[in-house]
Image (spheres, rainbow, N blue to C red):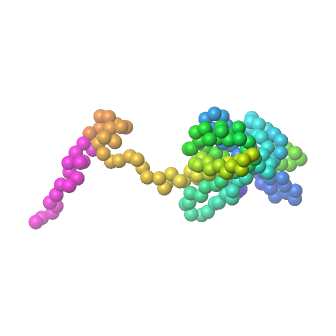
């Protein structure tokens, strides 16, 4: 956690009385959403962050020594039906979500909060209870790209997408099943 944290934030976390908080920034096409885990509004980095105390949930952020694409879950409960329609219509997959960790001291934010997780929004299942709903947003780690297959191929047609005049793969298909004699016989 100390990677990238300022000395002021490290001192605040090590203090006798600490008031930690998390902030969530989700980048949507229709506009960014900035929430934090407290009450009221706060200003940081030139933006206003809306408090979602008790309504905003963040799953455990896993960090391991192995190369692993561990994602997280964000949940927002008590969402009214009119806002639910916006969530259903929004194109969100592949957009960036960032979680910041910070601390208060004397009612103000200590130095700069540090990025504790950044990833791409994946799926958004919704649990509806009639009056209000809970939106769960799953965010993938950026390492998830290591598990995806590539859609590009080693073919002449594919090579011409990037380099139209390149003829390097022109004869690959014709020699694919060719029986080549190698060495003395």
| Residue 96 part of the magenta segment | no
Q: Is residue 8 visible?
A: no
Could you say where residue 12 lies in the image, as x and y percent from the top left?
Answer: 82, 53
Q: Which quadrant of the structure image shows residue 18? A: bottom right
Could you say where residue 172 lies in the image, as x and y percent from the top left?
Answer: 24, 48
Q: Is residue 147 visible?
A: yes
Q: Residue at x 23, y 53 (%)?
A: 176
Q: Quadrant of the N terminus?
A: bottom right
Asked whether, in this view, residue 33 is left or right of residue 16, the answer is left
Asked whether, in this view, residue 86 is left or right of residue 94, the answer is right
Q: Residue at x 81, y 58 (%)?
A: 14
Q: Which residues are magenta?
A: 169-185
Q: Residue furthest right?
A: 106
Asked whether, in this view, residue 73 is left or right of residue 167, the answer is right
Q: Which quadrant of the structure image shows residue 50? A: top right
| Residue 170 part of the magenta segment | yes
Q: Residue furthest bottom?
A: 185
Q: Which quadrant of the structure image shows residue 11? A: bottom right
Q: Residue at x 84, y 53 (%)?
A: 19
Q: Nearer the viewer, residue 50 or 1?
A: 50
Q: Quadrant of the C terminus?
A: bottom left
The secondary structure that dominates the magenta segment is loop
Q: Nearer the viewer, residue 133 or 17?
A: 133
Q: Nearer the viewer, residue 83 or 149?
A: 83
Q: Residue at x 14, y 60 (%)?
A: 181
Could you say where residue 115 lies in the image, as x and y percent from the top left?
Answer: 68, 49
Vertical arrangement, residue 165 with respect to residue 61, above or below: above
Q: Residue furthest left?
A: 185
Could you say where residue 152 lies in the image, as x and y percent from the top left?
Answer: 38, 46
């Amino acid at each position: 956690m100390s990677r990238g944290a300022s000395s002021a934030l490290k001192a605040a976390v090590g203090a006798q009385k600490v008031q930690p908080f998390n902030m969530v920034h989700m980048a949507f096409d229709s506009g960014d959403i900035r929430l934090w885990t407290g009450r009221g509004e706060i200003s940081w980095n030139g933006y206003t962050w809306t408090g979602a105390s008790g309504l905003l949930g963040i799953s455990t952020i896993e960090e391991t020594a192995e190369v692993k694409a561990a994602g997280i879950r964000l949940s927002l409960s008590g969402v009214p039906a009119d806002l639910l329609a916006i969530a259903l219509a929004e194109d969100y997959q592949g957009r960036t979500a960032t979680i910041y960790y910070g601390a208060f001291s004397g009612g103000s934010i200590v130095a700069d909060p540090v990025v504790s997780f950044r990833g791409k929004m994946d799926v958004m299942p919704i649990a509806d209870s009639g009056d209000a709903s809970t939106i769960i947003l799953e965010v993938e780690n950026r390492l998830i790209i290591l598990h995806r297959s590539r859609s590009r191929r080693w073919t002449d047609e594919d090579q011409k997408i990037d380099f139209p005049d390149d003829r390097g793969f022109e004869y690959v298909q014709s020699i694919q099943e060719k029986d080549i004699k190698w060495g003395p016989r």
